[in-house]
Amino acid sequence: MKIGTDGVLLGAWANIDHKPNAILDIGAGTGILSLMLAQRSTAENLEAIEIDEGAYEQCVENFEASPWADRLFCYHAGLDEFLEAPEEPYDLIISNPPFYTEAVSSGNEPRDRARQNRSLPFEELLEGASKLLSPEGLFSTVIPFKEEAEFVTLAASFGLFPSSILRVRGNPSTALKRSLLEFRFKEGKLMEDELTIEIKRHTYTKEYIALTKAFYLNM
């Protein structure tokens, strides 16, 4: 799986000001979010779950090859299986979930499964996050902007309320494309902001550079 902009944005943006010690990455793919959070935080326990066998194997390989191998662990499991035997709650849960509902095939079955939310519906994701999150914990995710209002409403049914939203567009002339969302169990002040990635093709805005430069070699 290629590393996408959504994952890089989420891994760089996710709030760690509360100094999470236990982090869970739901649907880890090849582990990019967990690796970014291992780089950014001092969390001692970073766990990931991934259902696709090929992605799981790449994730484990990437974890073992990283400087943070002793803090990272990936389970080959779906969220439903993981919920059967939960252990301690997590201070931060992060997920770059599949969100394409249409059954359009690219010819690559694992890639299609990773992109289409039949494998991890939003309702299942939110229910799992609500059961695994610590009382003061945060849940961060990225979804299409057009799905934001419905997702926030659905989250409220599981007792999760937005505390921060970053809406993202590709360039100044395009519509908003993604919403990065942070949830917690308590309702409170909502921080809202927007981010534009590029001024023009391959010319990045200073805001995007400031957010992500720690993760790019040539930014």
Image (cartoon, rainbow, N blue to C red):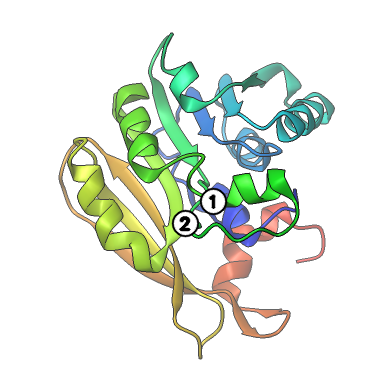
Label 1 secondary element: loop
Q: Residue at x 57, y 61 (%)?
A: 211
Quadrant of residue 103 within the rendered picture? bottom right
Taking the image as shown, residue 44 lies to the left or right of residue 130, namely: right
Label 2 and label 1: CA atoms lie apart by 6 Å
Q: Quadrant of residue 157?
A: top left
Which of marks 1 and 2 precedes in the sequence? 2
Residue at screen point 53% across, 47% down:
96
Residue placed farthest to the bottom in the image? 173
Residue 21, given in percent of the width and then of the height, sits at 48, 22
Q: Position of residue 8 (x, y in %)?
A: 62, 54
Instruction: Provide the secondary structure element on which disc 2 rests.
Output: loop
The residue tagged 1 is 116
Image coordinates of residue 63 in percent, x first then y, are 75, 28
Q: Residue at x 30, y 30 (%)?
A: 130
In this picture, is 101 found above or below 78? below
Q: Nearer the viewer, residue 4 or 106?
A: 106
The answer to whether the residues at label 2 and label 1 have Cβ atoms under 8 Å apart is yes
Q: Residue at x 72, y 26 (%)?
A: 68
- Is residue 161 shown left or right of residue 166? left
Q: Amino acid at mark 2?
A: Thr
- Name the image quarter holding the C terminus: bottom right
The x and y percentages for residue 54 are 76, 33
Viewer can see residue 161: no
On screen, residue 158 above or below 106 = above
Q: Is residue 186 left or right of residue 166?
A: left
Type of the residue with mark 1? Gln
Q: Nearer the viewer, residue 169 or 190?
A: 169
The residue that label 2 is drawn on is 101
- Vertical position of residue 117 compared to residue 198: above or below: above
Can residue 214 be seen? yes
